[in-house]
Image: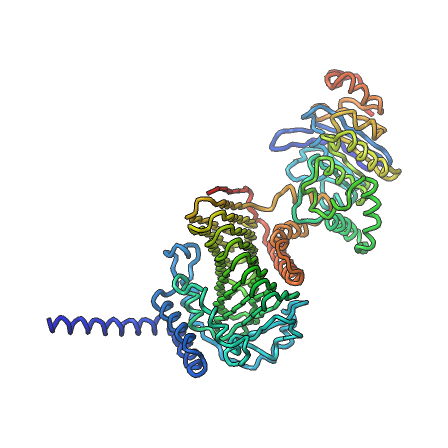
Amino acid sequence: MKRSRKTKVNVGILRQEKKMVGTTERFGNYLEAYNHVTAQGAEHEPVWLKQMREDGWARFTAKGFPTTHDEDWRFTNLAAATKTPFRRAGKTNAAHLAKEIEGYRLAGATCQLVFVNGHFSAELSEMGNLPRGLEICALKRAFDCGLEACAPGGIEQHLGRYADVRRDVFAALNTALWEDGAYLRIRRGAAIEHPVHLLYISASAGLQIMTHPRTLVVAEEHSQAAVVEDYVSIGEEAGFSNAVTELVAGEGAIVSHYLVERENLAALNVSTLRIEQARAANVASHSILLGGGMVRNNVHPVLAGEGTECLINGLFVGAGHQHLDNYMLVEHARPNGASRQFYNGILAGHSRGVFHGRIIVHKDAQKTDAKQTNRNLLLADTARIDTKPQLEIHADDVKCTHGATIGQIEEEQLFYLRSRGFPEIEARNLLLHAFAAECLDRMAEPAARAFIDELIRQRLHELVLAKSEQEGALPDEEEVQSWEEVG
Amino acid sequence: MALLEIENLHASVDGHEILKGLTLTVNAGEVHSIMGPNGSGKSTLAQVLARREAYEVTAGSVRFDGKDLLEMSPEEAACEGLFMAFQYPVEIPGVGNAYFLRSAMNAVRKYHGQDQLDAMDFLPLYKERLNLLEMDEKLMNRSVNEGFSGGEKKRNEILQLAMLEPKLAILDETDSGLDIDALRIVAQGVNAMRSNDRGFLVITHYQRLLNYIKPDFVHVLVDGKIAASGGAELALELEERGYGWAEADEQVQHA
């Protein structure tokens, strides 16, 4: 008895040691960052936050990065990307970026928060005259700014309460390692007229850095606001942005969120938008993926209150060897909710797109009306799209439809335009933009829309020009797949 | 002056010869009508002239305003002043009508090294032409042809003709599917555009349209060749006697 007990203990110790060694070996760069972040926060971070970080770290190390054996990651192989030893970057003076940053601003924004390598930059940010009812600050600052509104008590109620660290290892990693981000609170009944611009910049000369931006948007009852989260890189270095945003829409709130990914083509970008909607809240998520080498865009709305509406709108444009993966998880938890997913993909060269649209209708969510549409244009026969609908319906009185199409630019339309004098390149450009415009048309906020329209135009123009330079890559047969199902 | 000179034109689609030695000359200021039974090659002629790539020219020549049309891309032909009103106008979702029209005009102007039209230059002409075709301005805020009725689509073709002011306009069965009201409006648009320096090629299966657009010449196309030519009265004769007559009759002189 005694002996066997001893053995048991030994095994326990051994396992623990082995695990520690494993973590250091496999996640050395992440462990280094974790040690740094927890040491930094040791004094001023509240206990609940420390626990949250610990929990996130434990989940991350227990699970590790997903592989293609994981159903949710079947089409996206992260093996190479996750082996890269990305390092956290320290806070440096970002004043030298002042000039460069002008080209990235959103005209007509209420205010702009700028983050450089994961750290808030007060000198590059423009706070303007904040309208009544809008409280905004860097998340880190919120913990020691002393304002009642920003008091950790207000944040504690929401931060980390929605992002799913159990299921999503990247959300777990972000929860453990975030150093800064934005905190927005829109007061009850306030309507913020112009969009808030959050600019997350990776600018590291010669270093492969990682950032884990954390954003929290709390829109109280019957408030209204638009937030643009914008990821850019300055320079050609490969970086890793792992962002988590929690967006809480109170009863009757109207909120739109825009994600713009325009980092360089070496970037690894994983973003998770978790939306929590109370009764009659109306939320729109718009994702515009134009840049990034390996991109995973997770959008996870939970229609937690009765009679909510959610629009999940997206456009992804890939060229070269870009890999753009969109993972939608729409959860209907209460009755009379309506969700609309529209994703359009344009893929050129050897780029690859993924659309995974999962809809879960819980038992109580009767009279749910969920619709999902994914349309794709392949501009070369070397481009590829994987599109996968996944419906899980536990209620019996619901309407769920999904459909996907894969096609090419229509020759009839091209000829029509050319017969009116449009040069072929311009005609192609116009047709691509028209396809993209389906997504633009769903964006209600005029300043955000104009800003995104311009970015899309630039990207499509590059695509068409690149294509005309390497003619012959056009596939000659049109392949159209579509399915429609009512469950 | 000869605007369009077609000599012994042979053309095929998917290896099938459709045009088998067509010869035709259209001078500036003239309206020619091409009539013929289904499958005689009327639309193929229009498509070849508009430079659609799927139509292969195997023999013959086409000169347009003194230049070799068969060397031109569709956009070059358009910029040189050739316009085809489509039998089945294409819908282009996401491209606004007014934007499309102004961009088309500017594409032509750019080709000729002329200044671009801005919205202020464009609007007065645009409104005038909309009136001519009795078109609702609201319709023009929509995407090109999207959700238009058959008649609205055809009127939109003539609106484009009226805005682009080509040297040669080809109407490919513009009358098909039009009610009498729409037909009148389309004809009114075309007639307003008739001038001494513009030629028309009006392709139709029925004589009806020619009650409104009086042709100077009528040609009967049978099996890829012009079987008969005459004045406006030939159309009436065809209407009475049917195409069987023209197919059988070898005596009618070529114009």
Residue lying furthest right: B196
User: At which x and y percent is residue A444?
Assistant: 64, 57
Looking at the picture, tell me which residue is in the foreground, A447 or A475. A447
Tally the numbered discs: 0
In the displayed structure, A140 sits above or below A80; it is below
User: At which x and y percent is residue B27?
Assistant: 84, 35
Task: Tell me if residue A231 can be seen.
Answer: yes
- In the image, A400: left or right of A130? left
Locate the N terminus of chain A by quadrant. Answer: bottom left
Looking at the picture, tell me which residue is in the foreground, B214 or A277. A277
The chosen color scheme is: rainbow
Residue at 76% x, 34% y is B171
User: At which x and y percent is residue A327?
Assistant: 47, 56
Task: Tell me if residue A205 can be seen.
Answer: no
Residue at 41% x, 48% y is A394
- In the image, A451: left or right of A370? right
- In the image, B243: left or right of A56? right
Residue lying furthest bottom: A43
Quarter assignment of residue B161? top right
Looking at the picture, tell me which residue is in the foreground, B107 or A392. A392
Looking at the picture, tell me which residue is in the foreground, A90 or A397. A397
User: At which x and y percent is residue B120?
Assistant: 82, 55
Quarter assignment of residue A132? bottom right
In the displayed structure, A249 sits above or below A180; it is above
